[in-house]
Image (cartoon, helix red, strand yellow):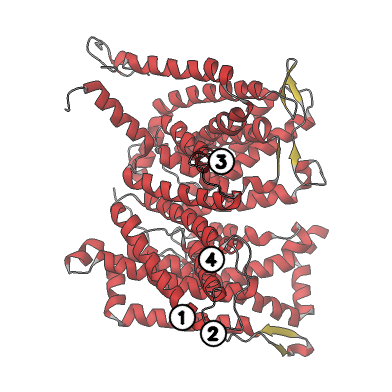
Amino acid sequence: MFYRVSGQFKTSYESDMALFPIRQDAVLLGVILLAMYVVFPLFASEFTFKALLVPVMIYSLAAMGLNILTGFAGQLSLGTAGFMGVGAYACYKLTTIFPEMNVVVALLLSGCFSAMVGVAFGLPSLRIKGFYLAIATLASQFFLVWLFEKWAWLYNYNASGAIEVRTMDFFGLVVTGPTAAPVTQYYFVLVIVSLITFCMINLTRGRYGRLWKAVRDMDIAAELVGINLMRAKLSAFAVSSYVVGVAGAMLVFFWKGAAEPNLFDIPLSFQVLFIAIIGGLGSILGNFLGAILIVALPVLLNFVPGLIGVEVNSATLEHVNVMVVGALIVGFLIAEPHGLARLWALIREKLIIWPFPH
Amino acid sequence: MDALYLMFVDPFVQMADAPDFFLQVLWEGLVSGVLYALIALGFVLIFKSSRIFNFAQGIMVVFAALTLVGLYEMGLPAWVSVGVTLLVMYGLAMCVERVVLRPLVGQPDIILFMASIGVTMFLIGFGEFVFGGENKVMITEALGIPTGAIELNPFDGFVLIEEKDLTAVIMAVLLVLGLLLFLNKTAMGRAIRALGDDPQAALSVGISLSQIWVLVWFIAGVIALATGIVWGARAGVSFALEVIAYKALPVLMLGGLESVAGAIIGGIAIGLLEKIFEIYWGQPLLGGNTETWFAFILALVVLLFRPQGLFGERIIERV
C-alpha cells in the first residue's frame, strides 16, 4: 500500500540502476532528511543533541568507514579506534600549527593523515588474511594508542597528556569549544556526515565498489580475472581510514571537546565493529541503524528503572547495561546474522507486495 | 652514532655486565610467557574443534577467578569453592553451547567471532553485577600456594624467584601435559581433533557436535580457572586481567591458530622477548610501557614471512 510500485516503469538500464529505483524510497529518505534537518533542531533538547543525535551521527560515520573495509572489501579490522585517534590528533595539530585554518578544512584534511597511516598498516593485508589479519590490525591499535601517550609533541606537551579543543569559529559562528551551541555542532556534524555518506554510496556503487566486492568474495578469483589486488585492498584501507579519521576528529571536536589517549583504546574499536555488524556488513544504511541501536540503547536503558518505578544505583545499572547490550548482540546475531539492513530489506519487500503474502 | 650505539651496543653491554639481572628478567619473562601460553591454549582448543575465534577466553579467566574468590568470601572452604567454580564453568559451557553456538551453527566465522564478543560483554556485566566491580585478592594461602621467595646467587649476583611464580610454571606444565595426553590418548580427545580436522566426516561417524562443544568449552573454562588463580596471585583479581587476554592474540598469530605446541612456544617466546625489549630498549629509548604493542608488532613481522604463523596449518587456497 505504502510501497506500491505499479506504474513505475523502467525504460532504460540507467533508470533501473538509479539510486532510487522506487519513488517511495526517495520520498522516505526525504522525510528522514527533513526530520534530521528541520524537525529535530526545532524540538530536541540540549541533552538529546549531546547524548543521542551527535553521537549516533559520529558513530555511524566511523562504522561506515569500517564497513567499507570489512563489509565491502572483506578485510576484518579491529584497529578502528586507533585510526580515529590519528584523525583526532591530526586535526588537533593542524588547528594549532595553522591557527587561522578553517575548522572544516582541518577536519577534512585530518582524514588524509589517517588514510596514510591506514595504508601503512594495510600493507600486511597483501600477505595475511582472515583472523590473522584481524589480529595484525590490533597491532596498529595498541601501537597508535601507545604513541598518543608517549609522543608529547602530539598533544603540545600538555601537562595533562590530553588534547583540548579550543574555541574556534566558522565565519563568525562558534562551532567548537565549550561555548559552542549544541545545535550548531549538530548541524556541522549532520552536513559532513550527509556529504560523506553521499560520496560513499556512490563510491561503493561504482568501479571501486565492485573491485572491493570482488576481492571480498574471493581474492584469488579476483586476481585471476585481472583485478590488481594491491590497488583494491590499499584503496579500501585508504578510503576506510579517511572516513574513520574524519569521524574520530569530529568525535573530539564536535562532541567530547577533549580527549585522552585511552579514549581511542580497544573498547571503542569494538563498539564501532558492533555497529557495523549489527547494522549489516556491506551496507551503508546498516551503519545508521546499528548506531541507533548501540549508541541510543544504553542511553534509553538508563530511563527504564525510573519508568517502572524501581530505584537502582548507578553502578548496578551500568553493569546491567553492559549485560543487556551483550545479550542483545548475541540475540540479534541469532535472529538476523546479516544485520538490521537485511531486516529492513525484508520489511520493504513485504510492504511492496502487501497485502499479498507472496 | 650515539643513537646507534644506544640501540645496538649498549643493551648487550648491560646484559653482559649484570648477568644476574638478565637472568631475573628472563625468569619474569618466562613466567608471564607461560601464562600467555595458557590463555592461548584455551583459544587454540576452541578454534581447533569449532573454528570459533573465541574472544571470551580472556573474560572467562576473570570470571573464573572472581567466582572462586566470591564463593570463598561467602564462607565456603577454599577447595570446595574450587569444585563449585568448576561446576559453574561447566554450566557456563552448557549455556554458551545451548544459547549461543547451537543457533549459530554454520554461520560465517566473523558472526561467531562477534557472538563471542557479545558473550564477553555479557560476562563482564554479569560478573560485575554479581561480585561487584572492585578489585579482589586471590586466596593464595587458603589454596596452599606457597608465597615465599627463593634466592639464588649465580655469577656472584642475586636472583629472586617467587614461589608462587614457580607454582604457576609447574602447574602450567602439568596442565599442558595432561591436556596433550587427553587429546592424544583418549577417545574424547581424538573426537575433538577429528572434529577440528573435518567436521562433516566427524559427524558422519557419530561424534556428537554439541557434546564435544560443551566439553571443549568446559576444558577452556578449567584452563581459565587455572590461569585466573596463578595470574590473580600475581596481580590481584580485577577486570584489568582482561587485557592479558589481548596478549594471547599475538601468541596465537606467532604460533598458529591451530597448534597446541605453537601456543606454548609462541607464548614463552613472546613473554621472554617482550620483557627483554622493555627492559633494555623500551625503557631507556622509547619511554617505557612498550609491552602493550611489542608482541603484536613482533607477530606481525613474523606473519609477513609465514602467513599461517610458525606452526599453523599451511593455508591452501583454491578457486
Relative vertical location of residue B34 with respect to residue A169 in this rendering, above or below: below
Along the horizontal axis of the image, is B224 left or right of A55? left
Q: CA distance from mark 3 to mark 4?
A: 36 Å
* Chain identity of mark 3: A
Q: Amino acid at mark 2?
A: Ile
- The amino acid on which the numbered mark 3 sits, given as a three-letter code, is Val
Task: Kindly identify which residue carries mark 1.
Answer: B175
Residue B178 on image: x %, y %? 41, 82
Q: Are marks 3 and 2 on the same chain?
A: no
Q: CA distance from mark 2 to mark 1?
A: 9 Å
Depth check, mark 3 against mark 2: the one in front is 2
Q: Which residue in the protein does label 2 denote?
A: B170
Instruction: Compute the Cα span from label 3 to label 2.
Output: 44 Å
- What residue is at 25 percent from the left and 21 percent from the top? A352
- Residue at mark 4 to residue at mark 1: CA–CA distance: 19 Å
Disc ID at residue B62: 4
Q: Residues within 10 Å of mark 1 (few under 14, many from 20)?
A: some
Disc nearer the start of the sequence (2/4): 4
Q: Of helix, strand and loop, which one carries label 4?
A: helix
Labels 2 and 4 within one chain: yes
Please give the chain letter of the residue carrying mark 2.
B
Does dot 1 land on a helix, a strand or a loop? Answer: helix
